[in-house]
């Protein structure tokens, strides 16, 4: 055997040459002459024969030896080069499948057919969810599609048939109410398969985002006793609120903690104190208006003759305030001052000498809407509003308007005592619907920024706001406050953290913190199902992605008594029902699910059967929402056999509460369930007063559950035989700062400088879709004529097409093309 290295060359130097010639000149001459004559020479023959034999033997021998050799290459293939190991792509999921065999599937289908009633049998689309075998599954579950029951059957497959331990399963939802409802369905269904699950165990499986992230935080050394800021209440530290992740309301304990930090900053930080002083004045003084603005010009036209009623108007309003024992107010000269506006003389109710500001008294909310200026035809509220417009356009000095008895004195005290007292005041951020306490304004703005996955302090520094934007000082103050507030909370004993701070701590930015989270906390996230996925925000998406990545890096397995099982994610939702964009959620993560959660294989599911509503209701709602685009190929199919033949177009009517009362009573007496929904809380309060008699009767009849008054947002997930919608779904405002935050978060289209506003135009249509699809058969939509006559665009009602069979437009003022 011979060992060879590649690269050797074959270059023999020895071997035969031409036959030898004569050795002497005479001999060579004789040989030449004989050769010319063609004579054969014996000596030459002998020499040639001898030469040929030797040459042939040598060549043949060499070839034979080569042919008989066995060659072994020590390094076969191309010559290697040195280098380091390559880096594996950071995937979130392994390439695997749930081992749902044909035999198992047949058994599952047979058991479901036997143990569930005929009207509970899954549809083909629902079976796709139940039997999905890929690492990720995205389920578009339209309104009324029965997603909760279907998800519970999926859990049954995971646990009962595949043997996955409950310790490796988590269902995440958004509200305490939905969590309790899902857990109840889980216990009921599993009981039919012989599994008795306690309430406690079911609530360990079904969790809110709140409670799940809290368990992550408490698992870290030094934070075992951490308290959630939003959970703080008089009942205890861990009292979970009923609200959605995006609808957290601050209670007295939260406001108290915020005020402690606020007061300390005001006394110790000169810049913060200066900013707050400016914000107080900005909030108290009426915004200046431009007479050239078309809307302002219309108001001025109506206010032309206001000077004629001004004396009686002042007397009437001041008398109301005196009767309420709220006038005069200390610090205000109640004799007022006369001022020339647009060539006419008007009287201000008061004057604050220390700040050089006029005071106008407004009409408190307790005053009846139909009250008029004595001796005149004008309504009191309208007259006060028109006078205020004149001051906003023509008065060069600051104007303070007091509209509520309860806080007027405090507002004046705040203005005149800025140098000595920490001010408590309401502030309205441009683009928000109304003013709120400065602490709530801070919290709301910071939460929006954090929900989009940004850091407040860094986001404020990166903002691009016009030099004269009134909110520049607000956001500078917010950055100072938010940094101090988090330090204030974490320094307490035990420490306190906001939920957004927890999500940020375990997001992709804080992925290193996940290294300290023990396996027992990550284990329940290995088989993850998320309900209402369309409502997630960037911060929760980042947390889920970082968690799944950490699980994969640890190679954490799913605990199972069956075949080997690996981490998976199922997301269930409906992009058409995403209605919390004003707080930072976005359907983008659901629409582009595969981008945010890439997987070797995935299962997309469209659950289009609607087991709630008649087709007329479905078609009317979709005619509005389909303008938003979203997941392609969606169309609800009415599958409620009980209402198949009960066709009623969605009625569109002029706003009339008397008509609402009449129709609501008719449905109540027919035994129907009723939802009265409003776009604004003010309309909800008006409806409650109008329906007081019916509500009282329902309580007497023990049928309170049959009639509910809610906002459009709060109605999500509910249904009723008859639904009354009060008010259009329209674009109320735009927001410069939220557009900027959208830009920073890279949300929406990169070419759209107003990404947030654009998203809100779509959300208006989605809100209408959610509201209409609460109805089983009857839906009445009451729209004020004023709303219907406003400018084109940004209104859901503009998409109503009376020519379609599912609409019945009964408004006196019809939409013109």
Image: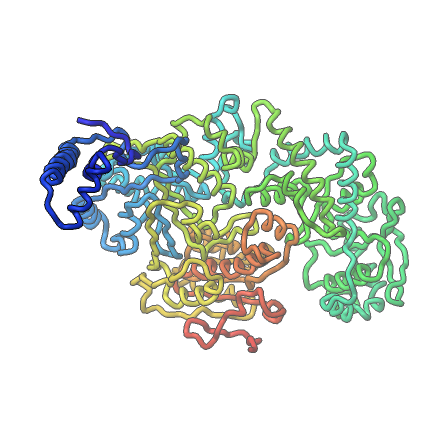
Residue at 35% over, 59% down: 608
Residue at the outermost front position: 26
**Viewer can see residue 484:** yes
Give coordinates of residue 656: x percent, y percent. 56, 67
Quarter of the image for the C terminus: give it. Answer: bottom right
Q: Nearer the viewer, residue 227 or 608?
A: 608
**Would you place residue 710 above or below residue 56 in this image?**
below
Which color scheme does this rendered protein use? rainbow
Residue 640 in the figure: left or right of residue 260: left
Residue at 20% over, 47% down: 105
Residue 644 in the figure: left or right of residue 766: left
Give coordinates of residue 715: x percent, y percent. 47, 53
**Viewer can see residue 701:** no
Q: Quadrant of residue 527?
A: top left
Residue 262 in the figure: left or right of residue 703: right
Q: Quadrant of residue 438?
A: top right
Give coordinates of residue 557: x percent, y percent. 32, 32
């Amino acid at each position: 055997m011979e060992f060879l290295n590649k690269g050797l060359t074959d270059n023999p130097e020895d071997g035969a040459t031409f036959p030898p010639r004569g050795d002497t000149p005479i001999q060579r001459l004789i040989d030449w002459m004989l050769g010319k004559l063609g004579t054969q020479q014996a000596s030459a023959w002998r020499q040639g024969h001898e030469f040929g034999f030797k040459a042939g033997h040598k060549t043949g021998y060499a070839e034979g030896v080569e042919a008989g050799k066995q060659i072994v290459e020590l390094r076969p293939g191309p010559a290697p080069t040195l280098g380091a190991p390559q880096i594996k792509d950071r995937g979130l999921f392994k390439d695997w499948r749930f081992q749902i065999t044909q035999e198992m599937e047949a058994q599952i289908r047979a058991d479901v057919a036997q143990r569930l009633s005929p009207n509970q049998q899954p549809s083909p689309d629902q079976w796709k969810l139940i039997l999905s075998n890929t690492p990720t599954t995205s389920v578009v579950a339209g309104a009324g599609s029965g997603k909760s029951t279907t998800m519970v059957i999926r859990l049954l497959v995971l646990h009962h048939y595949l043997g996955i331990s409950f310790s490796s399963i988590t269902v995440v939802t958004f509200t305490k109410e939905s969590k309790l409802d899902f857990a109840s369905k889980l216990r009921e269904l599993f009981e039919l398969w012989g599994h008795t699950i306690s309430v406690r165990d079911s609530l360990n499986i079904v969790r809110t985002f709140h409670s799940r992230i809290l368990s992550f935080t408490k698992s870290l050394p030094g934070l075992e006793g951490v308290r959630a800021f939003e959970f703080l209440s008089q009942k205890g530290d861990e009292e979970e609120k009923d609200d959605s992740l995006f609808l957290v309301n601050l209670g007295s304990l939260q406001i108290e903690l915020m005020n402690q930090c606020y007061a300390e900053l005001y006394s110790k930080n000169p810049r913060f104190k200066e900013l707050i002083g400016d914000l107080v004045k900005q909030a108290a003084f009426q915004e200046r208006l431009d007479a050239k603005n078309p809307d302002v010009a219309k108001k001025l036209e109506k206010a032309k003759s206001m000077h004629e009623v001004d004396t009686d108007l002042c007397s009437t309003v001041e008398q109301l305030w005196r009767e309420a024992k709220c006038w005069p107010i200390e610090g205000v000269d109640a004799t007022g001052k006369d001022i020339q506006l647009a060539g006419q003389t008007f009287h201000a109710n008061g004057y604050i000498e220390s700040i050089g500001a006029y005071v106008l008294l407004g009409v408190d909310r307790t005053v009846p809407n139909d009250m008029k200026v004595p001796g005149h035809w004008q309504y009191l509220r309208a007259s006060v509003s028109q006078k205020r417009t004149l001051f906003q356009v023509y008065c060069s000095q600051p104007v303070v308007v007091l509209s509520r008895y309860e806080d007027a004195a405090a507002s004046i005290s705040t203005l005149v005592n800025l140098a000595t007292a920490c001010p408590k005041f309401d502030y309205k951020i441009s683009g928000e619907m109304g003013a709120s306490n400065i602490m709530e304004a801070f919290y709301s703005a910071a939460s929006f920024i954090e929900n989009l996955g940004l850091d407040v302090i860094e986001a404020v520094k990166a903002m691009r706001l016009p030099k004269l934007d009134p909110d520049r000082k607000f956001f500078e103050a917010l950055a100072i406050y938010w940094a101090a507030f988090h330090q204030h909370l974490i320094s307490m004993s035990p420490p306190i953290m906001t939920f957004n701070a927890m999500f940020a701590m375990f997001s992709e930015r804080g992925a290193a913190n996940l290294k300290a989270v023990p396996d027992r906390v990550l284990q329940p996230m290995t088989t993850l199902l998320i309900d209402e996925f369309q409502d997630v925000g960037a911060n929760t998406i980042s947390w889920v992605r970082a968690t799944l990545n950490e699980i994969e890096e640890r190679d954490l397995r799913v605990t199972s008594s069956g075949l080997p099982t690996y981490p998976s994610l199922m997301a269930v939702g409906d992009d058409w029902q995403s209605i919390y964009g004003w707080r930072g959620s976005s359907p983008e993560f659901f629409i582009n699910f595969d981008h945010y959660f890439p997987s070797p294989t995935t299962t997309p599911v469209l659950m289009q059967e609607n087991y709630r509503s008649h087709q007329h209701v479905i078609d009317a709602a979709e005619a509005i929402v389909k303008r938003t685009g979203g997941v392609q190929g969606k169309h609800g199919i009415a599958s409620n056999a009980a209402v198949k033949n009960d066709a009623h177009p969605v009625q569109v009517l002029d706003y009339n509460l008397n008509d609402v009362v009449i129709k609501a009573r008719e449905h109540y007496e027919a035994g129907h369930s009723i939802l009265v929904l409003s776009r604004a809380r003010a309309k909800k309060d008006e409806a409650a007063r109008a329906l007081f008699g019916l509500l009282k009767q329902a309580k007497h009849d023990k049928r309170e559950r049959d009639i509910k008054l809610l906002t459009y947002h709060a109605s999500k997930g509910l249904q009723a035989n008859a639904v009354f919608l009060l008010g259009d779904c329209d674009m109320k405002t735009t927001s410069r700062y939220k557009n900027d935050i959208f830009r920073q978060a890279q949300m929406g289209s990169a070419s759209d400088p107003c990404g947030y506003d654009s998203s809100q135009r779509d959300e208006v249509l989605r809100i209408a879709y959610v509201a209409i699809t609460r109805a089983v058969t009857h839906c009445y939509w009451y729209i004020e004529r004023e709303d219907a006559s406003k400018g084109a665009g940004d209104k859901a009602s503009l998409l109503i097409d009376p020519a379609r069979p599912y609409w019945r437009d009964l408004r006196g003022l019809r939409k013109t093309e």
